[in-house]
Image (tube, coloured by chain):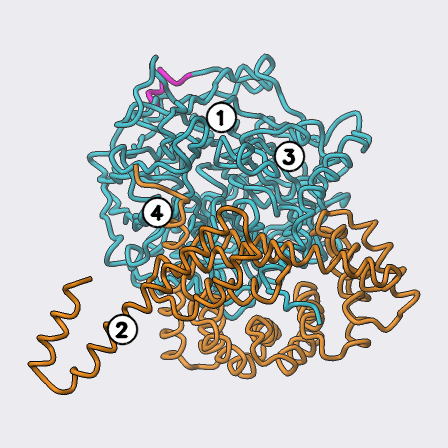
Chain colours: A orange, B cyan
Amino acid sequence: MRSKPIVAGLVILSGVALVAVQPVTAAAEQTRAGESASVQHGIDLVASGHCREALPILKRGLPRTTAKTLRYNAEMATVRCAMAVDDEQTAADTLLMLKREAPGDPEVLYIATHFFSELGMRSAHELQTRDPNSYQLKRLQAEALESEGKNDQAADIYREILKQNPNVSGIHYHLGQIALAEAGPSGSTDQAKQEFEEETKIDPTNASAEFVLGELARRAEQWNDAVQHFSRATKLDAGFSEAFLGLGMSLAASGKFAEAKAPLEIYVKQEPGDPAGHYQLAIADSRTGDKAGAAREMALQREAAQHNGATDNAQGHAVQQ
Amino acid sequence: MPPSLSRRAFLRASSCSAFAAVINQRLARAITAVPASPLFESIPASRSGIAFTHTAGLSPSMYLPETVGAGCAFLDYDNDGWMDIYLVNSGPCDFYTPPSPLRNALYKNNRDGTFTDVTRKAGVLGSAYGMGVAVGDYDGDGLPDLFVTQYPHSILYHNNGDGTFSDVTAKAGVSSPGWATSAVWFDYDNDGRLDLFVCRFADFSKEKNVWCGGHGPGERYYCKPNVYNPMPSWLFHNNGDGTFTDVSRESGIAASLGKAWGVVAADINNDGLMDLFVGDDTAPNGLFINQGKGKFIDNGVLAGVAYNPFGVARSGMGVDAADYNQDGWIDLFIANVDHEMYSLYCNGKDGTFSDQALATGIGAITRLMSGWGLKFFDYNNDGDIDLMIANGHPDLTIHSHHPELEYLQPLLLFQGSSGRGWKNVSAQAGPVFDRDIAGRGLALGDFDNDGSVDVLVSTNNGAPLLLKNNATKGNHWLGLRLVGTKSNIDAVGAKVTWKSGDLLRHCSKVGGGSYLSAHDPRIVLGLGTRKALDWIEVQWPHPGGTIQRFAGLPIDRYITITEGHAGWK
């Protein structure tokens, strides 16, 4: 630490502007060193299981901790402690900070998974304790069953919710998804369609339900229905890129190539890396006499397809011997 | 509001029960009463005398050719009016040294349901790692010649007419160095001589073999071909003197790089010129439209047959062409691998096609299947075109890393109704349709000359299946052998229209089709229960191009019609 004042002294000789800075920096260094020691102490307290004592020290010291490793360790210790003492706000704030400062860090992602899962469990528990008869709790149960593939049990609960609360949004949507899964690729989708239609009656702003109805119609080659549903989905959610693609594809399939171009152009702007949009737009361009546009989109389609293929390989589908 | 459901998530969600659908399909087969005489009956080797077994030479290095072969053919090599059989086998190459010599097999039809192996006398053993076979009378001497595709070079066997063949590859100039797969004889320039298109698969050699999967025990698998570079296919022009000229480049064929498995030649746009539909794996399918004057343009993308609707290349394998809906325009079929569905492309009459796989139910049925040999034909002679497909996953290890998929898969039979829909009748077609096989090649041929078109299915690393057709009982037919004089002698590209009472039908004699396989050159016209044929019209391919009408023809037998001759034999 002795070298710092000497350096500062040399700076004083060499220019005015830094004269004030360096003494302050030296002081700051001393303060920083003290804070670092304090933060490190907080980390050590966490390691020895003294979370309640550690947390105030860490919260106080963190804003002024700039050393990368120390800061990372302090943040991790803070998250662990905050979770241990049920300080959800601090845990969440620090985790979000960590995710920003160390994006993709496996340990951060691991802790985040645990934390948010724990948070979910706690919320569910609280819901069960405070309002055990609420439809929200039943919905949670049904969603859990659905995720386990227990579709029949889930559907029973969804229907029970609808009996008591016929206008709850999202329930028919789930029933529609279950009906689709049960129908399989070759079964009837009538039941699913009915559920999604009910959903749109209850919640006319549900773009997802409109999208699925559009997709079902597209697969059944009911182009007019598909166009109506996809159109509504795009109006409800201007960022719903795949609805634009569905709309363009359905218009093209029904021979309305000129009309198909506008939604497809939106789609290729939103999803330039997807060959689907370029492919469909190439066909629409070609059928409307725009040979140059078709050639351009075909080239973009090839490029996108090649890029996707390369990504597939890079992800380990094939490894060079 | 529920979270936005992406298209891909939706597609995944809606296909998750595909496995259950396959199981239900099997269950349906198991509980469906099979008629006493099944529609198709597998003739065992002990009855047919066909003792051939394909040897793939499967190795730990998992060279891709090991899992894709091989093909088969019906041909009448000795012109006795009875269909003989040719089967392709593996052989020596840079990645494979057979522990004992392997050979292809030519079986002569003994006219009593049995066959005799005449390979050694005929001299058609093959010389490398065999893939497929195309049959055509390229020199117009009335005898079918054999083009055997192989890795790393192919062979042209000239039929000497005395039960033997000669290897004329070098003289003809058609060795096609590389990995050749399917091939087809057809007359692209309408000069009356059969030219040769040869599919080339990827840029492959032992040195270029790629490791796919993990490096732990049992983790390696056969590669999806997207790890190999695409290559151009070959087009050879028949010079008429026993030699051919490689016109791949100047014709435009070589401009499209692909990984070609299957090919069919047909007049897609009714302009009198034969076009080509090529099934490519992880590369866009080719639709080579014949422009005349020796030029082709690949219009697959804008025609809508190159990619799936989302602009992604599928794994196209076997292909065929026929006017299944009888609207006067050739339609197309292509088999793909699991999760891609097969495609039934309906001709829009304007150079474009629409995939009817979903609308017809074929898509749902084939969602978890991988198809190779396939052919449109009227299996029950009711006058409507049907479809049979040989299936099997290309990766021997697929089940271990995709439990919902099986390496061995059953045959499929779809019954057509001339545009009024397709019905999966596999469950009613006989026990052989309940067997899981590594189906690859599929050839059509009426080996017992009873007018019921039989089927030969080759399997990978196994014995072929000879399927006798019993499905035509009560229906009448007329079999035609067409002989071109001005047009190519095999009459590839001819169109036949026939009328029997209320039934008016037409068909085209396409070149090739299926996968690695060649077919009985005769055409069987199905009449249903109608007991007479009013007339038939034969439109000969160019340069003949004439239309001949014949009336007063017999039924329930084969006849020969020669271009320009008023009568028939």
Query: Label 1: which residue?
Result: B84
Query: Label 4: which residue?
Result: B197
Q: What is the C-alpha distance between the residues marked 2 and 1?
A: 100 Å
- Looking at the picture, how far across and down is residue B88, in whole percent? 41, 27
Residue B286 seen anywhere in this rendered image of the structure:
yes
Q: Please name the amino acid that badge 3 sits on.
A: Gly
Which of disc 3 and disc 1 is earlier in sequence?
1
In this orientation, which residue lies closer to the viewer: B492 or A56?
Answer: A56
Query: Label 2: which residue?
Result: A27
Q: Which chain is indicated by disc 3?
A: B
Q: Which residues are magenta?
A: B118-124
The answer to whether marks 2 and 3 sit on the same chain is no
Which of disc 3 and disc 4 is earlier in sequence?
4
Q: Secondary structure at mark 4?
A: strand
Query: Label 3: which residue?
Result: B451
Q: Nearer the viewer, mark 1 or mark 3?
A: 1
The answer to whether marks 1 and 3 sit on the same chain is yes
Which of disc 1 and disc 4 is earlier in sequence?
1
Circle 2 packing at 10 Å, graded few (<14), some (14-19), many (20+), is few
In this orientation, which residue lies closer to the viewer: B14 or A177?
Answer: A177
Q: What is the C-alpha distance between the residues marked 4 and 2?
A: 84 Å
Q: Which residue is depicted at the point 36% across and 18% down?
A: B102
